[in-house]
Amino acid sequence: MAEKHSSSSLGVISRKSMFCLFSLVSALFILSWFLMLRSTGSAGFIDLSLLPHPKLNSVIDNGNSASWNRNDVEPSIGNRARAIPVDNEGDGGEEKPQEKDDLGNVKCNSFDNNCNQVLKVFMYDLPSEFHFGLLDWKPQGGSVWPDLRAKVPAYPGGLNLQHSIEYWLTMDLLASEIPGIPRAGSAVRVQNSSEADVIFVPFFSSISYNRYSKVNPHQKKSKNKSLEEKLVKFVTSQKEWRRSGGRDHIILAHHPNSMLYARMKLWTAMFILADFGRYSPNIANVGKDVIAPYKHVIKSYANDSSNFDSRPTLLYFQGAIYRKDGGFARQELYYALKDEKDVHFQFGSVQKDGVSKASQGMHSSKFCLNIAGDTPSSNRLFDAIASHCVPVIISDDIELPYEDVLDYSQFCIFVRTSDAVREKFLINLVRSIKKDEWTRMWQRLKEVENFFEFQYPSKEGDAVQMIWQAVARKVPAIRLKVNKFRRFSRFGTPKDGVLRKIPSPSNFW
């Protein structure tokens, strides 16, 4: 009995000892953690070295400031996005001089965040039949490219101009090799494809479709279809395509009907498009492709001194009223608005003096309707911007150029189609916008209009430079896809490192 009592007492003592030992260890652990926190910082036991540097506090999204005034132009517009360096040793050091190349472009290290890098573009020397030959330019001296110092080939006018994006980008790349041409420098052509960020395919697909998509009586296929087939054969046979599967290539197809055949063969590349209206998501999407603006057709409103009161028309629309697909809203709105006294809603075209009348009409209107037609976008939006006529966008599926750095809600009004067709909804909404609000949007239109202006030579912050910058923002994602593509290229493919089968679009994403 005594032995049992003694054993029980020892068990109690043992448990108490274990509890005391555990408590002591826990206390020592908590004390050591407390002392470590105090040694790493003195402001509420926070490690101040882990806080953002003051210079970074105002920088978000590619250099945009969190305290940015909506009436100011974004700091990142017109400049390549770059990080602000953190100087832990203080701000007293001298800035190192920037090394420049023969053309005056700043040389940059790929990993130097303190350098305003230029997009390096390798352009295929395609035969002239794919580009300037479509503009009736004849090659001379064996060169496939025109000498821009002698004469600049002209692009056809009229509605052809609205999809002329490939022309302006190609001209800019050619000009980057000529020291005497004063141009902005968001992109530069390089001759070694291994140094390039992207590979540019200079096919003028929009003018090819506009001019040569019809099959003549003596032809089995159109010239445009033949060119597309030859293009696919050429591009996919190049070592640049094979080593990346085309993921770093740029294909221009701004006209919604262009590249109908080639797009299905070259879908891994980055497309530069007007919208995604006639593309399936596995062929083109906002993740891999770039939306570029139309070139406006009407005249820019130079020296605009108008105001809310001097523009007599409240709401303006002139164009095709009866459209298929997503354009049903046009006819609905036509019947809803045609009798409003201060609304201009009429059929119109570019025939005769249509462009001149549209210019006059938009310049004298407060708001301009941009309604989805056969596709989500139209040139009308960019005509409105050039006219400083506040756009009213009724297109649920529209994608807009540079929207990752540009806030369109500051100078456009967006209305859902389901709301716009409700009785009196649209007209009441527009009438509710007063003078001060309209003036603010009108002023912002004048500030951003240059972002949509195509010109040669290109200038800082114009449409050409903005498109190159949009491409540059895709480069990290492109590199990721290319590096993944190359994982098994050494051991999982034939000796030449070529992946013979590119995955189908449905399996790519």
Image (cartoon, rainbow, N blue to C red):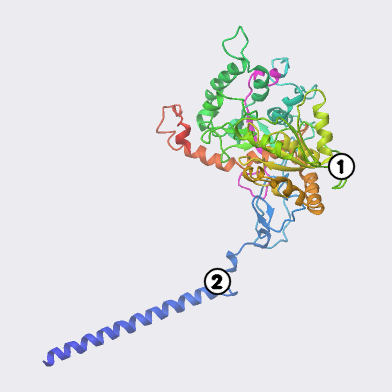
Q: Position of residue 327 (x, y in %)?
A: 64, 34
User: At label 1, which amino acid type do we have?
Assistant: Asp
Q: Position of residue 146 (x, y in %)?
A: 73, 21
Numbered range of the magenta stretch:
107-134
Mark toward the start of the polypeptide (1 vs 2): 2
Q: Nearer the viewer, residue 129 or 393?
A: 393
Helix, strand, or loop for circle 1?
loop
User: At label 2, which amino acid type do we have?
Assistant: Thr
**The magenta stretch spans residue 130:** yes
Helix, strand, or loop for circle 2?
helix
Q: Position of residue 183 (x, y in %)?
A: 77, 35
Label 1 Cα crowd, 10 Å radius (few <14 / some 14-19 / many 20+): few
- Residue drawn at x 62%, y 37% is 290
Where on the picture, by quarter, is residue 249? top right
Label 2 Cα crowd, 10 Å radius (few <14 / some 14-19 / many 20+): few
**Residue 40 image label:** 2
**Residue 304 image label:** 1
Q: Nearer the viewer, residue 263 or 114?
A: 263
